[in-house]
Amino acid sequence: MTTAHRITRILAPTAICLLITGCGYQTVGSYDPKPTGYRWASLYREDVRTVAVPVFTNRDFRRGVEIKLTEAVVKQIEAKTPYRVATKDKADTVLEADITSIDVPTLTRDVRTNLPQEQLYTINLNLRWKDLRTGKMLAERRNFQQTAPYYSTLGEGSAFGSQQAVERLALAIVQEMQADW
């Protein structure tokens, strides 16, 4: 008997058992016994269906970031949450943010030319998510910050750093909209 036949004779019954039992995992439904148990649920609030996202305000002199960030947040909400974006008069909640500052410090410089090599695009903001039906604050973050490095020497300008920071911040904002554990 060859080695392949021996391995097949040993592994075949194990594979059949795993296929029949499914290793004890369920992929649908829920397990919720009386005393304490587990419940599978969405990461997002079940009492919220719609979110208004007015254009964020910007207190920094760099213009246009607030529009890009608002658009990115709307896309993330539509792609990753069960919420639907609506106008403020038809929404259950409103998500507002104030960009307090945008900083672009230089992290490293070229030794010979003293030109910036690596820079860090940093967006700071205050975030509020409010239930319009009850007036309750669902989430609030002050001094919420996101950074994105970019490399001038590789042809990446501040627009590239800005876009990276906006996309990262939009994702982080939507993650803040998850239900409290």
Image (cartoon, helix red, strand yellow):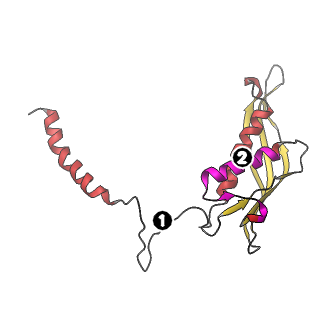
Q: Secondary structure at mark 2?
A: helix
- SS class, disc 1: loop
Residue 92 picture location, percent across and down: 71, 67
Query: Which circle's residue, 1 or 2, is located before the other in the chain?
Result: 1
Where does label 1 land, which residue? 40
Disc 1 crowd rating (10 Å Cα; few below 14, some 14-19, many 20+) is few
In the rendered image, residue 117, in percent from the top left (x then y), is placed at 77, 28
Please give left or right for residue 29 compared with residue 169 in the image.
left
Judge by depth and name the residue closer to the eye, 77 or 138: 77
- Is 69 contained in the magenta span? yes
Q: Amino acid at mark 1?
A: Trp
Q: Quadrant of the C terminus?
A: bottom right
Residue sitting at the far left:
1
- Residue holding disc 2: 72
Mark in front: 1 vs 2? 2
State how far apart marks 1 and 2 are (Cα): 29 Å
Residue 157 position (above or below residue 44): above
Residue 106 lies in quadrant: top right
Query: Given the image, on which type of amino acid does mark 2 rest?
Result: Ala
Q: Which residues are magenta?
A: 66-89
In-front residue for pair 170/116: 170
Occupied quadrant, residue 111: top right
